[in-house]
Amino acid sequence: MAGFVTPVCGRIRIGGRDVTHLPPHRRGIGMVVQQYALFPHLRVEDNVAFGLRAQKAPRAEIPGRVAEALEMTGMGGYAKRYPRELSGGQQQRVAIARALAIRPGVLLLDEPLSALDAQLRSGMLAELARLHRELPDVSLLYVTHDQVEALTLADRIAVMDKARLQDCGTPQELYRTPRTAFTASFVGSANLLPVTVDGSGDAVFEGRALAVAPVPGRAVAAGAQATLCVRPHLLALGEGGPNTLRGRLTEVQWRGATHRLRVEVSGHLLTADLPELREPPALGEEIALHFAPGDAVLLAAGVAGTAGSGATSGSSGTAESSEPADPAALAGASEAAGVSRG
Amino acid sequence: MLVPSRAGRWVLWTVFALLFLPLFALPLLVVVAASFAGHWSGAFPSDPTTAHYAAAVHGESLQALVTSLVTAVVASLLALALGTWTAIAAAGLGKRAKRSLDALLMLPVAVPSVVVGLAVLVAFSRPPLLLNGTSSIVILAHTLLVTAFAHQSVAAALARLDPAYEQAAASLGARPSYVLWRVKLPLLLPSLTAAAGLCFALSMGELSATMMLYPPDWVPLPVRIFTATDRGSLFSGSALAVVLMAATLLVLLAVSRLRTRGSYR
């Protein structure tokens, strides 16, 4: 995307413009990388001004745009510092300000939060979500291994596994009705059960028919092998409805707000996340779990991917707007930032 | 740190002092002692005098010191420019081409410097490039001899430089030349000054190639030291050697101060 590697085949288009053979400095993208890469010999303000000076922006405009970009990321008070005098989170904000200052059409974020600790990360995540709202004309391409980041920020998510595109859709689509077992287990955890589809469209699991609400446009042929996907938090304790599974409780984890139960059902281990239980059942007890037909999805077999291959995968959240960036709109967005902070 | 017991550390320090002090420091101290000596017939020098120094910083000797400083400064700046250029060019080359370039630059170092001096003398003694008898031929030979060191140290620093800086700069719209001047070279500054210091020190001490080349009006200090001692004036030679040593160390000190001011991390 950024132009540091030439693709063997295919084209790269940004806002309809073919950039496949353009060098990085002519692509008009802002880039934020994992290790920030702030220039250590320049002050924060000169770091942010770097892109503007390199592109020969009118000299009189530079201070204003630098201040604007720093203000947008909440780093206005640090303009005179050197990068080494800032914390990791602050450096990341400066890196984002530096990329935004050139008003790119696309902002490329390559695992921007992975070098930060958990608390800073959630703070920066909220900050990025705010920037994304306030800059509707800048497309963000966000590469992450963290499904929470992807679900929080993205308008559209593309799931990659071993350099191959596995799935692409809105977060809701990918989470509620994943297309493959890989997507199901990577975007949120999932219970995956091997089933056979019978004539009435029910899924038969170890001799028990389970009702599953069909997804439009994704019918599975009768008699076919398929995978049933149910999210752990959609399983409920006790009997109820048409879909009840019985099994032996093998593990109980108390996680504060929830209890995580592991239940062995006919040789398959199911995970259930339940709202905190007053009296959790004892280990080894026979218990029943149920789920609503609308909460389960049938994944046709043979649509690639096994749940076990998640180690080398990444998911990229793509938040896109159809319009290319235009300076007036960006200025408007930054004014909005001022208003929302006031 | 590596030896846990106190006694063990003492023994090690003693061995270290016995082995290294006589090897590295004592000969230099002896030169300093000789430079103040009027006579030296017994175990220690006698008749302390500063007359050798008075001679060493006047007239032709002073001229030689200036000659040496000018030669070393010009040669090391040239070598730094060439070495940086070749190092940056080599970074974009394939493995084989890079190795050939390395070998080419190392050639003057690998070959005995007397041979380099003679080769330069023969090569530039007739038109179109008639440099024989000028100061340029000395500077040229020194540049040839030290460029390899500048190239090596800049290339090593360049290999260590995180490519993320270059990529970030390029993504911000900076052309390659802008990246070079505004990002790469400033980040390489500590290594550049180190390389310049090394080249300077090497050039200040260069004798064998210079002997083959120096014109009568461009006599560097090492040559003068050699001729003085060759004549038998051991003590005035020592004084000149101390002056050479002090001048070199002073410049290196100044360069290293520049370096600490220019380092960022």
Image: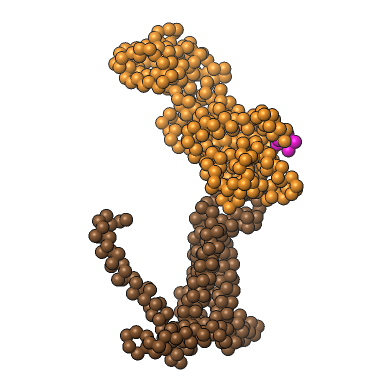
Q: Dividing the picture into quarters, in which one does residue A33 lie?
A: top right
Q: Is residue B7 left or right of residue B159?
A: left
Q: Is residue A156 above or below residue A215?
A: below
Residue A229 position, x and y percent, is 46, 20
Q: Is residue A225 above or below residue A40?
A: above
Read off the magenta span: A324-330
In magenta segment, residue A325: yes
Residue name at image x 57 percent, y 30 percent: A126
Q: Dividing the picture into quarters, in which one does residue B81 lie?
A: bottom right
Q: Nearer the viewer, residue A47 or A110?
A: A47
Residue name at image x 69 percent, y 29 percent: A339
As drawn, the chain in orange is A
Q: Is residue A38 above or below residue A321?
A: below
Residue name at image x 62 percent, y 36 percent: A74
Q: Which of A264 and B237 is in front in this view?
A: B237
Q: Can residue A140 be seen in this view?
A: yes
Q: Which of B134 and A75 is in front in this view?
A: A75
As drawn, the chain in brown is B
Residue name at image x 52 percent, y 87 percent: B55
